[in-house]
Image: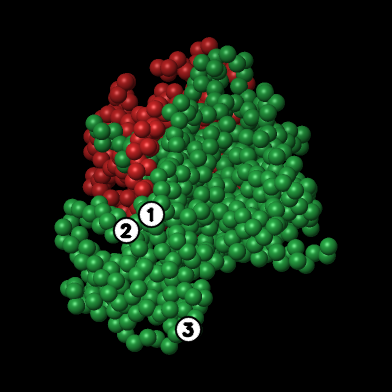
Chain colours: A green, B red
Amino acid sequence: MSGINDFAFKMGTVNGTGSASANTLLMQAIFRMGIPVTGKNIFPSNIQGLPTWYEVRVSKDGHTARPSTVDLVVALNPATYAKDVATVAPGGYLVYDSTWPLDPDLVREGITILGIPFGKMCVETFEGDRDRTLLRNIVYVGSLAALLDIDMGVIEQMLTEKFGKKPKLLASNHTAIKLGYDYAKANFTCPLPFRLEKMDATGDSILIDGNTACALGALYAGATVGAWYPITPATALMEAFKSFCEKYRVDKATGLHNYAIIQAEDELSAAGIAIGAGWAGARAFTNTSGPGISLMQEFIGLAYYTDIPAVFIDVQRCGPATGMPTRTQQADLLTLAYASHGDTKHLLLFPANPKECFEMTVEAFDLADRYQTPVFVASDLDIGMNDWMVKRFQWDDSYKPDRGKVLDAAALEKVKKFSRYLDVDGDGIAARTLPGVGGKGAYFVRGSGHDKHGLYTEDSDAYQELVDRLKRKFEGAAEHVPAPEILHQAGSEVALVTIGGCDAAVREAADLLRAEGIHTDFMRIRGFPFSNEVRAFLGRHEHTFVIEQNRDAQLRSLIGIELGFARDQMIPILDYGGMPLSAQKVVDAVKTHLAGVPA
Amino acid sequence: MTSIAKPPVRHPSSRVNGLGLSIRDYEGAMSTLCAGCGHDSVTAALVQAAWELELEPHRVGKMSGIGCSSKTTAYFMKQSHGFNSVHGRMPSVTSGANAANRSLTYIGISGDGDSLSIGFGQLSHAIRRNVNMLYVIENNGVYGLTKGQFSASADIGSTSKKGEANEQAPIDPVLVALTLGCTFVARSFSGDKKQLVPILKAGIAHKGLALIDVISPCVSFNDHEGSTKSYSYTREHEVEAVQTDFVPLKREITVPETGEAVQVVEMHDGSRVRLRSTSADYDPTDRDSAYAHVRACQARHEIATGLLFVDETGKDMHDHLRTVPTPLIDLPYEALCPGKGALDKLMERYR
């Protein structure tokens, strides 16, 4: 790290002071210089006044995982000075606001401290507290532009795009950028040893967050009913869906909507609305996070037991209870796999980044319809809320939604008798009808015991026949959920098994380990139930590591339960403090384990 | 025990409605409730109302939660689609179904446990959302399926079968509905089919959520001396506010002129409800006076029945959502997906 186009920096600010848009501006400018970049917003569950950080990683090799150290810190929050200065890599830099004397907390050997009087310059240049506070962020963008050699032309262009219609704001932002830039140029040797240089590596990419991507997936899948209850970190998903619908789904002549978005009174209701709409024949979904999933459990069981499609997008956060709502985790895996009381099992999809969020959300709707069951997209806060650099999304206009086995009036004419849960094809999937269809199509959905005809029963054999069919249906889905991503290296005795947003860090770790002579095979599980490919990968290595973001090694448990693979044959690498995973953590854990294994 | 289908016997002379269906065509499976249960009378009234309204059975969604009341959706309109969901959550399921397909008639059947305890939030928010549906609460003040616990509608002083007196204040769904802005509020008694059938018909025709609280005595656990939801108590204390005669447009039913004040309220579909006030000064279109009337009756230990409040000008859920008149499930996929060109263009926004 710490060379040209290969370093990381972060800003430590107070939330609610307007730093978020300045940070986005910084990252986007680097992206537009053609250099691979990622940003991680480490923010509090609060509106104003608590510490917040924004980490930017520049990687010419395209690594997007969270960096394990940073080369430069802009420390603007006195409350976190001590913590922030400690994260600077040896030989790195610290930028502070020299309007005030250097705080003793910021003093540290082995790093270079750069003072820039952000506050003073803003007071002298701008009127009013609001502008002075907001523009201070833009001033540091200007200083970083000088220190890191960000193309000023790109920044100017972006400001024009953003404030083109507001000349006053454009002028003040322009002034602020110049203030910071000129001060750094005049007082320091610019650029720093680590700096940016234009590349051509982002042309086919975009910067997007996973929530927006899921919303786009729902839009393109043809979802018409979205039900939700606001919850961090899932809120922005339905808000994005709403804004896409307003753009693409409003009848131009009448102004009427080709969609229904219902903000429910709670997550129970949101689940009920999605299931009711799924029963009625709409593609319906709800988005939530862990606490919402807890509340939806009863309904999830109902939909499972009565063969009703619905898509649930779980943007996971740190649990249990309220937990840490603005920190990321993958700790809902077991809850999702077996959500609800009784014998239940569900189809799960695990996107690793926003591109997969888009693709898998579309896929989730197809699977839900085909298997007539709740399908879960297990995203997380890091994927959902941070801007990721991913390839542009593609769409094939020949796509047709898979609505599964639905008998319309004409098809009903041809059947002698309609029995809702009769497994005609032997795949566990019975044809359904939609309410409103006439003739023989009417049936009664009941969460109570029912037989293959849909009739009430308390008969043991009839009950078992039905739940056995559900199991058959579930198992049949294993080869139709997204296949694992597997990368082999010749002669590997080490396997790295991971899931979801750990992908980038584990892949980078594999690169780092190879550089040290440790060859690994890599498997990222992308769907549940586990396919034969997942099963075949396991058990063939001397050492199998399972890397995931929860305390209890839930993925490892799931593999153990479902595939019968001995749990003590899998070494867990667990990172559950709420921060996105870094490659170094994985490397260190693998090496530590291997060092301790007797030859 | 499995469900019991009724034999499809039709007497050749039985009358048919405009769809050529006899009243038997609107019946469902055999009731498995206790003999004499008030709920079965409500079921019978619903069958009558649906037959008279000439509802196409397959265009009806029968929605319910859990409890004795919620079982009754199986006992009427066997040719309709039914959804017996989870306890207290029928309103959300109906909201979703209605959002997806607004062209069906939704009949929700609930009870006092289902709606006033576990599902109180869902009831409130379905009213607030104003889902276009009939919402019947079969209210008996007691948990029947779990054998006799008080429900939230039990009156103070009402005693359980074991003699224990309820000391907590009851929740009156009618007052709640009036407070929350419900656009159709009525109360009736399961044993008064003459009053109940027209109210059910008016509620089905109403655009928006029509809440009908039906006092429906539980013969097994709440029909004894000391209960304020028993047949005898209700018959003695019932005070009818407004009589309702539903008048379908297709076939005018003449109402004998009695010289009493009759108010005509036009429903959204053009059909009309005739409101007959028992007292000359009662105005069923005034929310405040409806509230005062129910409270005044309560103070006299009387039960206000009849159509207590109606507002045909209210916006329903689809008005709030500004959805197209076509049911969302009938929109072709091509109208929903913006396509490749739009996506490629959109990608530039994320550069």
Instruction: Give the amino acid type for the residue marked by disc 2 in the picture.
Output: Asp
How crowded is the residue under tag 1: few (<14 C-alpha within 10 Å), some, or many (20+)? some
Find residue A484 and report its image quarter: top right
Looking at the image, residue A447 sits to the left or right of residue A593; the answer is left
Both labels 1 and 2 in a single chain: yes
Looking at the image, residue A105 sits to the left or right of residue B268; the answer is right
Both labels 1 and 3 in a single chain: yes
Instruction: Give the amino acid type for the residue marked by disc 3 in the picture.
Output: Arg
Res. B132 in view: no
The residue sitting at the right extreme is: A599
Q: Mark 3 lies on which chain?
A: A
The residue sitting at the top extreme is: B12
Q: Which chain carries label 1?
A: A
Residue A197 lies, with reference to residue B307, above or below; the image says below
Residue B140 — which label?
A: none
Residue A165: x, y in percent?
A: 18, 52
Q: Name the residue under label 2.
A: A151
The one of A87 and A52 positioned closer to us in this rendering: A87
Mark 3 to mark 2: distance in Å? Answer: 31 Å
